[in-house]
Image (cartoon, coloured by chain):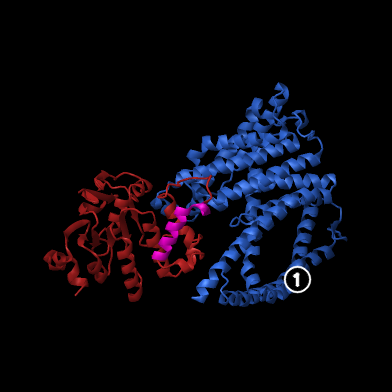
């Protein structure tokens, strides 16, 4: 009796505490978006933040398909790119006709472009899930990307279609010439889109999407047509991808065929998967990391795609839940208070693992330099390695091989410590 | 009064092999009807034909007087027929609560709504809580369905099947693989949840069949060889020869 009397208010307190924490996270994220450019105000970081913001919307829209509905698309950039093209055409039309539509509304037209295309092709595409959907999405992607080079009047051929974002009616005295104003426009749409996409997961349709992902066959026997569910999900994903495309068009003041292509489709898959598709915030982490790496690595190395590939393979093999999956694995340990028993084994593993990574990087760079006949030295963390000298090759091999052998032992220690901590957590009633 | 399910001379062939040869079956409103028969007799195929999971080769299946053969499973479900599966068939990554709630959504008229918060639908909440209470899984509501024990998954399977409020419930071997105690619990659960509805059940456990069913049909090689009350079936010489004689002494 006493238990029953006390547990209800406790539960209520826990619930409202959870709600408070939930709103706090959104508020902190919004404040961070406002404050970030004030802390890092250089032109370079503003550009980076703008691109990250667009990538976040794009990756979240992709996860409506992959994480929420279980649809693996290889052509998500089509909706993104078409959104970008429609946005550019709208901007040019508004500028030439003097229509009273200011720039902040342009991404909406991008969204409509993505949605319209999804409505037209989606019904056929989403008839089946799995491999059939993946293959059709790949085909449609290639089809649209190649037609974009042929239909010059709409897509502008190789050079694309340019626009001038400052030519639109100004609002609040903002011309959107300076990058900081464009950044805040993007940040605004990031917040709106993220809230909308999160809200979508909390609706009847959002939950049935999850059911279709888990078991489309069973869904048919509780009154739902999985085809309709997939079609609607595809439409929403197309809409938000189009918004991201519209923002890109504003950011670069151009739309070209590269927006629609397989590389762009691959990058968004990559971002969503590395971040982790099982949690809403996963693709956000993935978009931040992938965009940052893409911008950072291209300056440092000529073979940056190779590193992307290695990271992707490592995630698929060792952490299929992505970064979000790794983070959320620790939640029951934190709650049970057993996390501190695992941390020492993490710290021990850091050094040999880093040595191995360093060896791998040195190997890749040395090989890349030699095969490209590049006589420059390989500069890693302030040390210069001459790719033509044997000592470099030996160092790379020792770091890679030795690092791997020692790291393997420390990884085993992590696994053991982890098992013990997880068992204790489970005994204390905290499930993964 | 129209029959709940009426099947007239339905056939189903896979390639050249006729699984269901000439199936005639009639289930009255509110009746608990068991289909029994040896392995490979076509019991599950019969279930799949009625629920629209597979299409019959020749067509005549009626639900509450309306022809349903040829319809898609969700169309049949919306007309008031709900079925469970022999192999547990739940939404593994979603919690027990979400599993049942998904099964309630269509029946409560929320369909594909993307403008309502699913957590703020009082009728959905009430019905989901009621079903969880009925299947004794309220204490497991936040556990992903894939992590439940086998018996709990079977109960959840029944819960999902009845949650939509269909008036014809079809259960495919609901107690398969359960211990005696679990079977007893499951039978009590089925009896309570299908009160006032029509039940069609495929079952191998004869104590369950004879304890639960008002009428029994015996299916052998795609033919109903007998249909009647438990007493009639027990006394039927054809049934004794074909089926009961071997398995239930």
A103 or A294: which is nearer to us?
Answer: A103
Find numbered disc 1 in the image and state the secondary structure of the residue it sits on.
helix
Residue A156 visible here: no
Is B9 rendered above or below residue A325? above
Give the residue pinned by disc 1.
A352
Question: Residue A429, image x and y in percent?
Answer: 56, 74
Q: Does the magenta portion include B128?
A: yes
Taking the image as shown, residue A208 lies to the left or right of residue B43, namely: right
At a point 30% along the width and 58% down the height, the residue shown is B44
Q: Which residue is painted at 77% across and 54% down in the image? A: A368
> For chain B, what colour was chosen?
red
Provide residue A178's location: percent of width, then percent of height: 82, 37
Q: How many labels does the image show?
A: 1
Above or below, A86 relative to B159? above
List x then y, in percent, for residue A122: 51, 39
Residue at horizontal 22 percent and vertical 72 percent from the top: B247
Provide the chain ID for the residue under circle 1: A
Residue B152 appears in which quarter of the rendering?
bottom left
Q: Colour of chain A?
A: blue
Locate the C terminus of chain A by quadrant: bottom right
* Mark 1, other Cα within 10 Å: few <14 / some 14–19 / many ≥20: many
- Can residue A350 be seen here? The reply is yes
Q: Where is residue A377 in the image (x, y as percent from the top left)?
A: 86, 56
The answer to which of A81 and B29 lies nearer the viewer is B29
A49 sits to left or right of B184:
right
Q: Is residue B188 left or right of residue A79?
A: left
Secondary structure mostly taken by the magenta-highlighted segment of the chain = helix
Q: Does the magenta stretch include residue A386?
A: no
Residue range of the region highlighted in magenta in the rendering: B118-134
Q: Taking A124 as reference, is B236 left or right?
A: left
């Amino acid at each position: 009796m006493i238990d029953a009397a006390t547990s209800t208010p406790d539960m209520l307190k826990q619930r409202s505490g959870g709600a408070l924490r939930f709103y706090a996270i959104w508020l902190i994220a919004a404040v961070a978006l406002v404050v970030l450019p004030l802390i890092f105000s250089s032109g370079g970081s503003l550009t980076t933040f703008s691109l990250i913001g667009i990538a976040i919307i794009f990756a979240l829209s992709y996860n409506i398909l992959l994480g929420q509905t279980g649809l693996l698309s290889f052509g998500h950039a089509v909706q993104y790119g078409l959104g970008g093209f429609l946005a550019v055409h709208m901007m040019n039309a508004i500028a030439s006709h003097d229509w009273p539509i200011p720039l902040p509304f342009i991404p909406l037209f991008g969204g409509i472009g993505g949605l319209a295309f999804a409505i037209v092709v989606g019904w056929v595409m989403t008839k089946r899930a799995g491999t059939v959907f993946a293959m059709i999405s790949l085909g449609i992607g290639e089809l649209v990307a190649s037609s974009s080079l042929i239909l010059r009047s709409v897509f502008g051929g190789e050079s694309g279609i340019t626009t001038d974002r400052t030519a639109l009616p100004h609002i609040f005295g903002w011309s959107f010439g300076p990058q900081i104003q464009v950044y805040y426009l993007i940040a605004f749409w990031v917040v709106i889109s993220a809230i909308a996409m999160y809200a979508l997961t909390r609706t009847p349709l959002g939950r049935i999407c999850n059911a279709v992902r888990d078991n489309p066959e069973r869904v048919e026997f509780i009154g739902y047509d999985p085809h309709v569910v997939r079609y609607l999900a595809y439409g929403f994903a197309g809409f938000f991808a189009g918004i991201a495309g519209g923002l890109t068009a504003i950011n670069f003041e151009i739309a070209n065929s590269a927006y629609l292509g397989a590389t762009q489709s691959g990058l968004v898959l990559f971002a969503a998967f590395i971040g982790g598709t099982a949690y809403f915030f996963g693709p956000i982490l993935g978009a931040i990391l992938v965009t940052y790496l893409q911008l950072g690595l291209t300056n440092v190395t000529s073979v940056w795609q190779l590193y992307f590939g290695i990271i992707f393979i490592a995630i698929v093999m060792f952490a299929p839940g992505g970064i979000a999956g790794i983070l959320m694995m620790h939640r029951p340990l934190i709650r049970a208070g057993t996390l501190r028993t695992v941390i020492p084994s993490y710290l021990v593993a850091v050094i040999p693992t880093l040595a191995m990574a360093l060896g791998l990087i040195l190997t890749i760079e040395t090989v890349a330099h030699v095969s490209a006949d590049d006589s420059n030295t390989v500069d890693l963390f302030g040390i210069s390695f001459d790719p033509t000298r044997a000592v470099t090759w030996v160092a790379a091999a020792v770091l890679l091989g030795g690092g791997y052998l020692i790291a393997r032992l420390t990884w085993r220690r992590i696994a053991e410590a982890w098992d013990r901590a997880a068992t204790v957590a489970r005994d204390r009633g905290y499930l993964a | 009064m129209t029959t709940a399910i009426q099947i007239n001379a339905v056939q189903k062939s896979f390639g050249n092999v006729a699984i269901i040869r000439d199936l005639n079956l009639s289930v009255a409103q509110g009746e608990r009807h068991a289909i029994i028969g040896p392995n490979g007799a076509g019991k599950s195929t019969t279930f799949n034909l009625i629920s629209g999971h597979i299409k019959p080769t020749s067509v005549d299946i009626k639900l509450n007087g309306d022809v349903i053969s040829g319809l898609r499973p969700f169309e049949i479900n919306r007309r008031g027929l709900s079925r469970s599966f022999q192999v547990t068939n739940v939404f593994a990554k979603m919690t027990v609560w979400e599993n049942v709630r998904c099964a309630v959504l269509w029946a409560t008229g929320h369909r594909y709504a993307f403008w309502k918060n699913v957590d703020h639908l009082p009728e959905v909440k009430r019905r989901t809580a009621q079903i969880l209470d009925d299947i004794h899984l309220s204490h497991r509501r936040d556990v992903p369905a894939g992590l439940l024990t086998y018996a709990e998954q079977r109960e959840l399977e029944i819960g999902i099947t009845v949650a939509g409020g269909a008036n014809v419930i079809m259960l495919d071997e609901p107690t398969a693989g359960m211990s005696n105690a679990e079977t007893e619990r499951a039978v009590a659960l089925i009896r309570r949840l299908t009160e006032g509805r029509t039940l069609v059940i495929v079952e191998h456990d004869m104590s369950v069949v004879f304890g639960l069913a008002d009428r029994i049909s015996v299916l052998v090689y795609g033919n109903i060889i007998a249909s009647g009350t438990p007493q009639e079936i027990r006394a039927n010489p054809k049934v004794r020869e074909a089926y009961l004689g071997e398995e239930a002494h």
